[in-house]
Amino acid sequence: MKIFLVRFGFISILFMLLSAGLASVAFSDRFVYYKTIETPYKKVAWNLHLINRKPENVEGKLVLLGSSLIQGGINDSILSRAGIPTLNMAVPHNGNDLNLYFFEKIQALKPKEVLWLKGKVPFTGLHKLSPLLYKPKELVARGQALNGSFIHYFFKRVKLSLEYISFSLFQGDWNLTPEQLDFIEKSYGFIPAPGIISQTVYLEYSSGEVLRNDEYYNLYLNDYTYQKEKAGKGPLRLVLGKRQFIDQVFLKSNFFRNVVSQEKFISKAQEKSKIQEIEFSKIYIPLLIDAMTSDNVNYRRRFFRKSSTDMENPIALPSYRFLNDKRYWSDVDHVSADGATLLTQIYSEFILARKLGK
Amino acid sequence: MLFNSLDFAVFLPIVFGLYWFVFKNKLKAQNLLIVAASYLFYGWWDYRFLALILFSTIVDYSIGRFLANEERSVRRTLLIWISIVVNLGFLGFFKYYNFFLDNFVMAFSFLGQEISSSGLNIILPVGISFYTFQTLSYTIDVYKRNLEPTEDFIGFMAFVSFFPQLVAGPIERATNLLPQFYERRVFEYSKAVDGLRQILWGLFKKIVIADQCAALVNPIFDNSDNLSGSTLIWGAFLFAFQIYGDFSGYSDIAIGTSRLFGFNLMKNFSFPYFSRDIAEFWRRWHISLSTWFRDYLYIPLGGSRGGLKMKLRNTFIIFLVSGFWHGANWTFIVWGGLNALYFLPLLLTKRNRQNIDIIGGSGSRISVRDVLNLLGTFLLTLLAWVFFRAENVHHAFRYLNGIFDRTVFNPVQDFSGVLLLLIGLFLVIEWFGRESEFAIEHIGLKVSGVLRWSFYIVLALLIVAHMDNQQDFIYFQF
């Protein structure tokens, strides 16, 4: 047994060291373009191209960072026309890690202000593109805990490293096609979500039936706190109750779900923004259920859960009822192009008023 | 819990540590640990169905005890029928209820009688077909007096629920596995290392071969009506390796994991794609199921004792039932029937046992005829796999129709040279290891030091490199 464990341990350590070595290979921006340009994450290539080739475009701007909610929710050209020069650098999928990555890239380019997406509930896990953008050492240095999310990230990074080596060896002559080049050169940061929500889904939502089963709606009723299921009576129920307790303490804890690390990424950005004298605020983007929820004075508590990194109140409105129309929604989470126009117009007034101290 | 998940990667070392360090030399405690671990392993998917396993265990254990004290033939027969009805009753309800209902309704509408029905929304408990057959093997063997009924309830629980093979086999015989729960287990270095090697190879088959094939096979079968004949051939070819890598990979991980705990499970696959005729293929594919049907259905039906007619009838029954065992869909029945048809010429010419040894085994020469037979057999299985994978029989025929089309000469869409290279590498390794228990077993015996360890690390890196495209094991649905 001793020999077995020693040898198995040795080969495992050898494998992990080799994997760590591979994971530490730095990827070129060209590889990032190659991996993202034909995917829903092509905005990453657009962002990098802008930072590398047109850094002057960032200076003095209000930069928006976040997920598809911002990418298709806030139209930067409307804000710019309203007198707030803006750049929408949001990329689909939730993850403060990705926001931090772009924040660090632009901080030296002197943006005036950063608006960071405020989630309804704190983000969990890691952004899908973290393995492409961060080396393990870099991610850990920014506050990533050594948990399940990190393990998933790590092995995906090793996979990408192998792919990068193959890309460098065999696809050295890869270049963007004219259409792809056109996209990263000419597009805007705002990419509207496609289409309009179907009448059936919209009516189902309006009826309240779906709403009652909606996780966010139920969280809203519970003040955004995940509730334990009641164990009830009887021996089996008791066991299930214990299982739920173990689930809550371990598997669903903020550490294992990576909420702690996600909050640390925001803290990191806030620290750096203070040093660089960049204004830093969070902005809330509504979901369909918010448009269907009645107006309330306590909206900052009721639309989203406050988190430890909400140093000041996030930008949010007391009501989103003005969006309660089918044509303003692409799906239950994303506003449509029309919805984005309306939302941006209203937010622009709000932001301008805030700047004037009203 | 899936073998290729992070959950299992945490679960296995914990159970291994408890088993060999905390409960070392305590047979009862080790068996109890296996039961607890197995129930946790299964309950991770859906704890409600643990009650089903527990019920089957209690029923078959009790029937075994009753059979031990019963000499009267009528009562013994009654007891075995209770076991068969209870076990197959559960299987029938969970797996086949809606199928029979739908076909019943369809048959009536065909006769001009419209009847309304509403199927039940039944969840199929994972692995029910596997553990049902395993517990049945116990009661049948006890009934036939091939096995002494056990008094050890914990040992029997462990036999029924043994986690490495609980959800997708190999379907163990009570005569092989159950006695292993009575014997004191001693840790053997060579056995454990062999187990790890087999787990590594199983993961390679599943993650690098099967899952990568699945990523291309699924869209091809989903859009088969709009694709060229050449692409459909490519899809069927990849599915052959998907199903083999998926199922034999699972078996390898199951057998390897059992070895870590000191158990020996039966071999389930023996390089089936190196078969020279369909009879040989079936001696090498899903061996635990084929031999189960042989011992508990084919032989009781009379086997080959009643002449050619009976032999043909029984062969067809076996293949049709085997097809139906795989799922409640006519595609599986047609797949079984097709394999029976392939068998027919071999039975008629009495050549069904002409290829007993592995091709080119023990230094024998490989003839051109062997190679042609091998390719022919592979093509026949490929054709049958189309039925196995298709959504319904109509879809399978449309798929085959699409292959035999002028577009067969068009360029293949979704072609992947890297995947073809991986399959090629896989076949080369399997070829050189075809006389071993599993393909890379001989690497542990013949290849030394740095080269061997480098090989393991390359395999592990390939597994890691393909981990983000994981799919469920196909045989879980059976």
Image (cartoon, grey):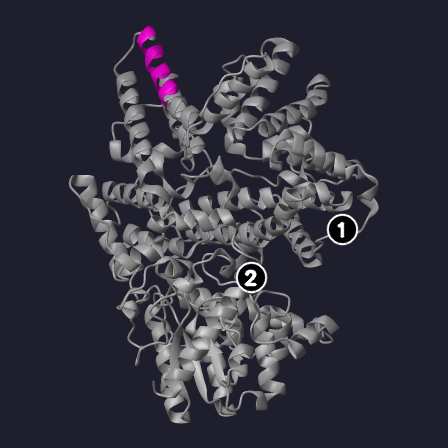
Report x, y in % for residue B153. 25, 31
Residue B269 position (above or below residue B191): above
- Quarter assignment of residue A316: bottom left
Magenta region includes residue B78: yes
Q: Is residue B467 magenta?
A: no
Same-subunit check for callouts 2 and 1: yes
Q: Which mark is residue B452?
A: 2
Horizontally, is B212 left or right of A227 in the view? Answer: right
Work out how far the residue at label 2 is from the one at label 1, CA to CA, in angstroms: 37 Å
Q: Residues within 10 Å of mark 2 (few under 14, many from 20)?
A: some
Query: Is disc 1 surrounded by few (<14), some (14 to 19) or many (20+) residues within 10 Å?
Result: some
Q: Amino acid at mark 2?
A: Arg
Query: Total label count?
Result: 2
Q: Residue at x 67, y 33 (%)?
A: B396
Which one is earlier in the sequence, the residue at label 2 or at label 1?
Answer: 1
**Which percent across, then down, holds residue B368?**
80, 39
Front residue (pair A283, A173):
A283
User: Which of the two residues, A142 or B344, is positioned nearer the viewer here?
Assistant: A142
Residue A162 location (% of width, % of height): 59, 69
| Residue B60 or residue A66, whichever sits in front | A66
Which of these two is toward me, B2 or B119? B119
Give the residue pinned by disc 1. B412
**Range drawn in magenta:** B74-86
Q: Residue at x 25, y 27 (%)?
A: B151
Circle 1: element type: loop
**Residue flagged by tag 1: what amino acid is it?**
Val
- Chain for disc number 1: B
The reply to whether residue A253 is visible in this rendering is yes
Kindly indicate the quadrant of the structure image that contains residue A51: bottom right
Q: Is residue B437 visible?
A: no
The relative height of residue A260 versus residue A196 in the rendered view (above or below) is below
